[in-house]
Image (cartoon, grey):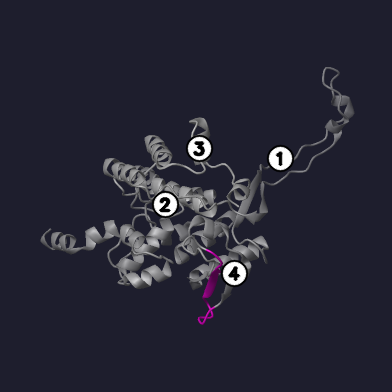
Amino acid sequence: MARHCALFWRPTAFDAWCRRNNRIALPATPETVADYLDARAGKGSRPASLSRYKASIAKIHQLLELKDPTPAPLVKLRLQTVRREKGAAQKQARPLRFKGPVRDVERDKARGLNIRALLESCGEDLPGLRDRALLSAAYDTGLRASELVAVAIEHIEEAIDPEARLLQILRHKGDQDGEGATAYLSPRTVAAIAAWTEAAGITTGPLFRRVQVRRYKARAAVRGRPIDSISGRETWDLRKTLSKPAVKARVEYDIGTVALHPGSIGPIFRSIIGRAFDRGALPDLTADDLARLLKGISAHSTRIGLNQDLFASGEDLAGIMDALRWKSPRMPLAYNRNLAAEQGAAGRLMAKIG
């Protein structure tokens, strides 16, 4: 059975590395796995990534009913060594919070880089309507990029609040059994989605799609020339005798039929921020501030921002884990680390004593 299944195993990075280094991938020895993890660490892989590589190697061995080499002490020792050298902390994306870096999410005015200003600055053309709906839904739900682009019209259902909606998430990262989950869509997001789908003519299928923009410049009217005015030194062309009406500048849009690629979400968020800054919607940011902030923006920024806003609003860990579909408290606590330091005991004391 193992040999039969192996015929259908697609080559992986581990398999390719083994081939290059004259190693046996299936079944692998602990020495081979440890050397592979060392090689990936040497190329810059972080401990979290190495753990995923190790888990993938373990999984394929289990599926093929081969002895799993990854629990060996040698493999664990190599990973521990990398953690000590590089640290286990992952670089966190910069959060996109609804009102920005505020203490009181209910009473404080929005400031800095904030989703409220970004939503208000989105245009009323098709790209602007799409971007507003995308950003608003991303914040409401805390969906990852792959989950966000998988949203379809058919996944949106009525809620108790007639102005809100519920989003059925068919599958998400922590949902290994495919049980699905439900997320809340605020009236703000429902209105943005309605405006986008109506303008784009989307009634079924993927909600968030590519919008290709074609811009045509204005052309002045051209008066036709008499035939006898065409010099013999010119290229003869009868069309020179025809008049052409003036053409106004126009913009045409081509809306795709398939969902956006997950890799496009981060760049779209950064474009929204750049346009908002250009329109003066982020008045307390300088150009240097913008350049620094953009470096940390990714598709995960709305998920982290929602996580921090929930903490700041006083929600308990269990509620936050449920809202963001966490199976473990490790990541929501890690995303709240910086906010907790500022609003913790020491932060409160320093604010009092100036």
Q: Residue at x 84, y 20 (%)?
A: 231
> Which mark is first along the chain, 1 or 4?
4
Front one among 102 and 92: 92
Q: CA distance from mark 4 to mark 1?
A: 49 Å
**In the rendering, at what x and y percent does residue 227 appear?**
89, 28
Q: CA distance from mark 1 to mark 3?
A: 71 Å
* Residue 312 on the magenta span: no
Tell me the amino acid under the disc marked 1. Answer: Ala
Which of the numbered marks, if any, corresponds to residue 220?
1
Q: CA distance from mark 2 to mark 1?
A: 33 Å
Q: Residue at x 62, y 67 (%)?
A: 153
Image quadrant in which you'd find residue 316: bottom left
> Which mark is first along the chain, 1 or 2?
1
> Which mark is first along the chain, 3 or 4?
3
Which residue position is annotated with label 4?
155
Report helix, strand or loop for mark 2: loop
Q: Which residues are magenta?
A: 159-171
Tell me the amino acid under the disc marked 2. Answer: Gly
Numbered disc in front, either 1 or 3: 3
Which residue position is annotated with label 2?
280
Tell me the amino acid under the disc marked 3. Answer: Ile
Numbered disc in front, either 4 or 3: 3
Q: Is residue 98 visible?
A: no
* Residue 165 on the magenta span: yes
197 shown above or below 72: below
Front one among 233 and 182: 182
Front one among 134 and 175: 175
**In the rendering, at what x and y percent does residue 108 appear?**
30, 66
Q: Residue at x 49, y 40 (%)?
A: 14
Residue at the left extreme of this rendering: 353
Report helix, strand or loop for mark 3: loop
